[in-house]
Amino acid sequence: MTATRTAVRVRGLRKIYRPARYREVAALNGLDLDIGTGEIVALLGPNGAGKTTTVQILTGFRRRDAGEVTVLGTDPAAADRAWRARLGIVPQQASDFGELTVGEVVRHLAGYYPDPHDSAELIDAVGLTGQASTRLRRLSGGQRRRVDLALGLLGRPELLVLDEPTTGLDPAVRRQFWGLIRQLAAAGTTVLLSTHYLDEAEALASRVAVMAAGRIVAAGPPATLAGRDTGTAIVSWQEGGVPRSERTPAPARLVAALAARAAAPDGEIPGLTVTRPSLEDTYLRLIGVTPHRPGTPEDTP
Amino acid sequence: MTAASSTPSSPPALPAPALPAPVRPSPAGLTPALPSLLRTSVSRGRLEITSFFRDRESLIFTFSLPVILLVVFGEVFHGTIGSTGVAFRQYFAAGIIASGIMSATFVNVGASVAADRADGTLTRLAGTPMPPAAYFAGKAIGALAVAAAEAGLLLAVGAAAFGLRLPGTASRWLTLAWVFILGTAACAVLGLALSSLPRSPRGSSAMFNLPYLVLSFISGVYFVFRDLPPVLQHVAALFPLKWLCQGLRSVFLPAAAAVAEPARSWELGEIALVLGAWLAAGLVLCMTTFRWLDRE
């Protein structure tokens, strides 16, 4: 086993597209990213932020125009078969192999890898034993996605890249997916996840990286991303039967003041809540969209 | 109804299957070898054949069209070729086998690669350690199998209904073998080479059928080649189908029919040369033009 501490290292990555002859658009504009071995990192960002381009460059599908990229100790632009065998990719929704059965597809693709999982074991692990002899065309959306995951895991990858893995899945199946991904990470697999779902990022990722306009605008654990744990909090309470709300950088001080001022006879403050910005609020602020919070009273200065 | 059964319960818990450990402890310094090109090619070929024979629509279309053409036109066409005394039906039967081979290879391979591009197969394969050449080899193996089935079927119908005779000598069988393999491979590789052109899988079928149909009309399938206007003869001689037809006539028609060819002989050397050249050109085109992913 190669003992690299860093699974992915990206510095100053640039990618330019030419949609028309004399027009250039920088899809990636100086992107930096580090992923440690065994981490689950979620790549978040609106459509067009460059998530797919980043994933495609990291997996050796696209060339870059500038910057340094190292994935599992190798430059993906010079990728060979041995490097590919250490990487697992779960692409966005696919409909390939429609006429073949789950078992046939898994056994066939196992034949590309030097040390694949046992096909039957893997099919069992993703919960498809009952569908092993069903053609892929006849599977439900969730079953189809599990096949995709099984194919990504087939070669015992050191790095698993998931492109919107749970789009279109029902909540129960999503949770099962998350369980599988957590299990993998616990066993030492590094996971790079591109997703639109903030709850998925929050539930899975040890770190999230938010992309906007071709670069990472913030990265960190979901709970502390962009200082959301220490930033402005919203304290809400009831005073004289009227709901009140206040933004403050020092919620403890405000609550102490309220306890002295607005407490009921039992010593409690009616309707008291202290809310930090949610991951979604933080995300929307980072990508330049003002969070809209219906039902929240305006600030009382 | 008991109280217990009416209690709203949380959704049934999904099984949480244990995943096999991702990294298998292996003896230090000993990495298992990557599977060989031969093994992966054979595996790809088997997969292509299985997929093709399970796709009922393309199966029926590929196999029935040439048979229908053979039966319908075989009933319409009468007379003999020039002064050779050989029935035109026999000439036509040999031609439709060649045409069927081109449809089973050039059109089918081209359209199937376009479908592979559209449904995500190519992206999936490009992300695995499969040697890229195994994909091309698999398509060629699949094309050979489909073309052999197609040729066998047409041969059976032609022999039963139109007096087509199976090769009587070992040297004719040998000619059949190399003409078939070279023609199939050249047409399959050309289909692969052109597969990067269509932008949508819907357009691909039309794109591959157009040159196929045009060539069928000017290459000596439906008409005696020597009776075509010289300009068309010269154009057709640049492409593989004319030579594939001629090669198959040399196998299935009596030796007396050779005088009906433009050169008054079968020109086996020229056939090998032209088909071989197309195979080589197709391979070069494949290597230079093939796209695993959509255009950037």
Image (cartoon, coloured by chain):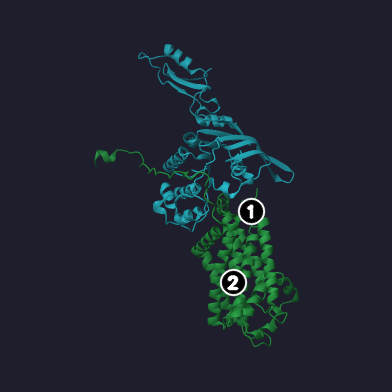
Which class describes the residues within 10 Å of circle 2: few (<14), some (14-19), or many (20+)?
Answer: many
**Which chain contains the residue that carries disc 2?**
B
Give percent across and percent down for residue B114: 60, 58
A118 in relation to A252, above or below: below
Mark earlier in primary sequence (1, 2):
2
Residue displayed at 61% across by 56% down:
B200
Residue displayed at 63% across by 39% down:
A69
Helix, strand or loop under label 2: helix
Label at residue B129: none
Number of residue marks: 2
Label at residue B291: 1
Give percent across and percent down for residue B193: 65, 60
Name the residue beneath numbered marker 2: B100
Which amino acid type is shown beneath numbered disc 1?
Arg
What is the display colour for chain B?
Answer: green
Look at discs 1 and 2 and give the one toward the viewer: 1
Give percent across and percent down for residue B24: 46, 45
Which amino acid type is shown beneath numbered disc 2?
Gly
B235 in relation to A29, above or below: below
Give percent across and percent down for residue A171: 43, 41
What is the display colour for chain A?
Answer: cyan
